Image (cartoon, helix red, strand yellow):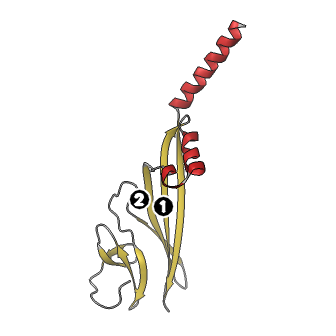
Amino acid sequence: MRLKKRIRTTILVAAVLIAATFKIYAIREGTGALAIWNPTEAYMFAQVDRRGDTSSHLLFPWILFKEYVIGGFVGAVEPNDGRAFLVVFDVRSASVVPNVVGLENPVKGEPGTDPSQYASLDGRIYATCSRGLYGRCRWAGDHFERSSRRGGAAP
């Protein structure tokens, strides 16, 4: 009887140690897209955000409980890693050309362009950009660059 109890205790302790030692990396991904066109060209801008968190197997059930049962501000788990990028499809009559543009890290705030509020003006595509380009920027075929355009409608 004692031997069985000792074996159970040993297995339980080993399982807890293994669960505390090995890590889980959970990733949540979100995507949003926008299409803009004029008579000669069309673009589709698809922004992809990936946020991840690393925890032990022992802590992971608590994180899930906080997020899905408790919820709200109290249940929020701050991710410790993130990546964001923009996939731009240049659609012309003969071909589709994809471009990938790195964006600001949504967790650590590393520099990027992070375009938003797109607008098509005078045959060009403009956006509001943050970090590095500050203010209005324009699509230059494979990346965003600072716009020198003054006045007129803001994107």
Foreground residue among 140 and 15: 15
Q: Eyeballing the image, is 138 above or below 75? A: below
Q: Split into 4 quadrants, where in the image is the N terminus?
A: top right
In-image side of 66 versus 142 (left or right): right
- Dividing the picture into quadrants, the one containing residue 108 is bottom left
Give coordinates of residue 56: x percent, y percent: 52, 36
Foreground residue among 40 and 45: 45
Q: 10 Å neighbourhood of mark 2: few (<14), some, or many (≥20)? A: some
- Which residue, given by chain and number where applicable, does mark 1 sit on? 49
| Type of amino acid under label 2 | Pro
- Which residue reaches farthest top? 2
Residue at x 55% of width, y 34% of height: 58
Residue 130 numbered mark, or none = none
- Which residue, given by chain and number where applicable, does mark 2 sit on? 106
- Dividing the picture into quadrants, the one containing residue 102 is bottom left
Spatial separation of the CA atoms under disc 1 and disc 2:
8 Å
Q: How many labels sit on residues?
A: 2
Residue at x 30% of width, y 80% of height: 147
Give coordinates of residue 53: x percent, y percent: 48, 47
Residue at x 45% of width, y 50% of height: 79
In-image side of 140 versus 77 (left or right): left
Give coordinates of residue 98: x percent, y percent: 49, 71
Foreground residue among 45 and 107: 107
Q: Secondary structure at mark 1?
A: strand
Q: Secondary structure at mark 2?
A: loop
| Type of amino acid under label 1 | Asp
Give coordinates of residue 109: x percent, y percent: 35, 58
